[in-house]
Amino acid sequence: MACGFRRAIASQLSRVLNLPPENLITSISAVPISQKEEVADFQLSVDSLLEKDNDHSRPDIQVQAKRLAEKLRCDTVVSEISTGQRTVNFKINRELLTKTVLQQVIEDGSKYGLKSELFSGLPQKKIVVEFSSPNVAKKFHVGHLRSTIIGNFIANLKEALGHQVIRINYLGDWGMQFGLLGTGFQLFGYEEKLQSNPLQHLFEVYVQVNKEAADDKSVAKAAQEFFQRLELGDVQALSLWQKFRDLSIEEYIRVYKRLGVYFDEYSGESFYREKSQEVLKLLESKGLLLKTIKGTAVVDLSGNGDPSSICTVMRSDGTSLYATRDLAAAIDRMDKYNFDTMIYVTDKGQKKHFQQVFQMLKIMGYDWAERCQHVPFGVVQGMKTRRGDVTFLEDVLNEIQLRMLQNMASIKTTKELKNPQETAERVGLAALIIQDFKGLLLTDYKFSWDRVFQSRGDTGVFLQYTHARLHSLEETFGCGYLNDFNTACLQEPQSVSILQHLLRFDEVLYKSSQDFQPRHIVSYLLTLSHLAAVAHKTLQIKDSPPEVAGARLHLFKAVRSVLANGMKLLGITPVCRM
């Protein structure tokens, strides 16, 4: 896309270089705007062009750039050609730039940037994204927030690009902790408390039974026996487990609704308790299963006994483990969905686990293991409420809403809001998501309430404020001005900077789709909001001649549209008033 300009430049280059235009598209990029100087609109990287050419006796790159620029001619699209550091630069005819960009943004709507030539020819795929995955019978821990919002972003982006996405929530609903919880509930549980506040009560029971099991071996033994009964399909044990699971999912769905997240499938480790036995049989039939002195079963992935490459797949009592159930789940999903890619979104602590799971699938003879991918992320430190240490996500969401309401109470327009609680939650969530997505996903970061809620600076509050402000402009002036506009009225530096920035949206989407990092989109939207803030001050609509007012209103409408598109991809619901 970049409104067809990239393709027009590639066509002229292809004639000079005798290369197909398709080979040149990715070497031509929109130039990031600069506050210091007026920049060209596009540049051709001569480096990347020469990488495609296998001639290793190439002369100096700067000389190459100059020679190439001399062979090119300005036309109806390109008004100026120059050279930079190892680049050839192209300036687009200003009126054509204005008209084409604004028309494209309005016509493409939510698809702006996604119809780009950068994405053309990419096959439509079936993609499974497994994310969030909290542990059943425990309140939604804040540690699962990152997996939830990152997985949601990846699923949103892939879906926007036209892929078929299946969002799976793979619940931690099986394992030794249920032995402890079942035993704990029989000892300390109350049915009334379970019905009135299920996850809080189960959390209390779990803490209590863990303490008891540490001091009393008979409690630990009873827990082990309870889990064995579960694995063997004991009706009474399963009925209690099912109750814990159902109550937990009800609670989670409520929290997901607040986050604006949904799933196509609620799966869980429990689905694979029988299929994991089939996995063990398959490993054994291939001679991969080794028994240890302790009676556990392991797979040696190194083939030479390297302890760091040994993965335990069965306990000594014959019960399955997390790794075995993950193997069974992957095989089952391939049978069910025949996916092209499966993405697991979990913290970086599970990196080795997934490496081993993918390796085991491979040695079991499943070539599609190469289609499985782990997207790891770092840890959030210091997320506390005023009441002290935070464990639960809902406490954070409530705190966000409360603080945002207090912030908004000082703004006059808040009185006009139909639903201040909902607006406060949406703005607060934007604040949380932007703080999380600003850096590399893999890095740990320190959470700061003060930074989160700054209304100026690079925050989610600033993005929401910009969107609401631009929406208000349309409401105030909209109807009369938006019919036709004169592109000659948008030649001020502030207008041109915005148009140049809008040109780059497809490249930013492309970058994020390649490396799954939302920070490219975040940085782009923050720059767009800063440009809009400057333009809002200098490009007045009120008291301007109708054709100037109309042109400026079109520009601001385009900014708001792209801002909303980007925010929605990140999992943020834009607000129209705040």
Image: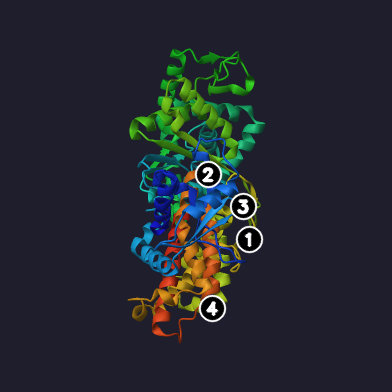
Instruction: Name the residue beneath numbered marker 4.
Output: 538
Residue 229 place in picture, x, y as percent: 46, 26
The Cα–Cα distance between marks 2 and 4, rounded to whole angstroms, is 39 Å
Q: Quadrant of the N terminus?
A: bottom left
Q: Residues within 10 Å of mark 3 (few under 14, many from 20)?
A: some
Instruction: Name the residue beneath numbered marker 2.
Output: 48
Judge depth for marks 3 and 1 and give the one in front.
Answer: 1
**Residue at horizontal 60%, vertical 40%?**
208
The Cα–Cα distance between marks 1 and 2, rounded to whole angstroms, is 43 Å
Judge depth for marks 2 and 4 and give the one in front.
Answer: 2
- Asked if residue 6 shows in the view, the reply is yes
Residue 88 place in picture, x, y as percent: 53, 54
Residue type, mark 2 in image = Ser
The Cα–Cα distance between marks 3 and 4, rounded to whole angstroms, is 45 Å
Judge depth for marks 3 and 4 and give the one in front.
Answer: 4
Judge depth for marks 3 and 2 and give the one in front.
Answer: 2
The Cα–Cα distance between marks 3 and 2, rounded to whole angstroms, is 49 Å
Residue type, mark 4 in image = Thr
Residue 303 place in picture, x, y as percent: 57, 15
Looking at the rendered structure, which numbered label has been put on residue 390?
3
Secondary element type, mark 2:
helix
